[in-house]
Image (cartoon, helix red, strand yellow):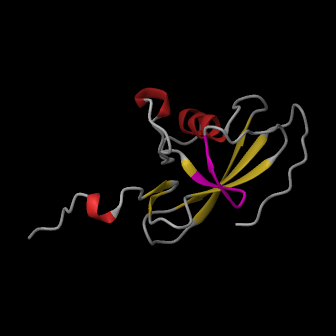
Amino acid sequence: MNPTPKTRQPGQPVVLHIARGVGDGDTRIDDYTLPAGAAASVLDGLRWIREHLDETLAFRYSCINANACKECMMHVDGEVVYACVARLEDGAQYDVAPLPNKARVRDLVSEIAPSKERLDLDPI
């Protein structure tokens, strides 16, 4: 994904272009518009989208309830970032995708456990 230029426009909505799909299947980009001031970080924006616009949006985080970190890593405007610290600016647009070097599970959820630590559900 190519980074989208940022031009701060106070009071203007924020747009997130989110890459969605399941596993190795096709990827589509869904655009979500958030009101100005609705979210301070990308993670806040994703949570706002899931609460107000699309409850099917899949992403992973655990810092709020489990005091764990590194769960919300994703690709934002061409960089790997923690969604909880990536700040949103009014009037800007952001490209959001799962981690590029990990297998996609669904939407923004990437496989993060090493293969030797994953539960094997295939019958023996």
The answer to whether 63 is drawn above or below residue 100 in the figure is above
Quadrant where the image shows the N terminus = bottom right
Foreground pick, 47 / 79: 79
Specify the farthest residue to the left. Answer: 124
Whether residue 82 is in magenta: the answer is yes
Residue at position x 50%, y 56% in the image: 107
Identify whether 60 is placed above or below 105. Answer: above
**Residue 116 in which image quadrant:** bottom left
* Residue under the point 60% across and 34% down: 48
Q: In screen coordinates, is 58 left or right of 13?
A: left
Percent x, y for residue 98? 55, 58
Tell me the magenta residue range: 74-83
The one nearer the camera, 114 or 48, is: 114
Percent x, y for residue 60? 47, 45
Where 100 falls versus 68 (above or below)? Answer: below
Residue 99 appears at what percent x and percent y? 55, 60
**Chief SS of the magenta region:** strand
In the displayed structure image, the side of residue 121 where residue 63 appears, left or right: right
Q: Quadrant of residue 124?
A: bottom left
Q: Residue 3, how many percent across, how many down? A: 77, 61
Q: Residue at x 50, y 62 (%)?
A: 21
- How many marks on residues? 0
Q: Is residue 81 magenta?
A: yes
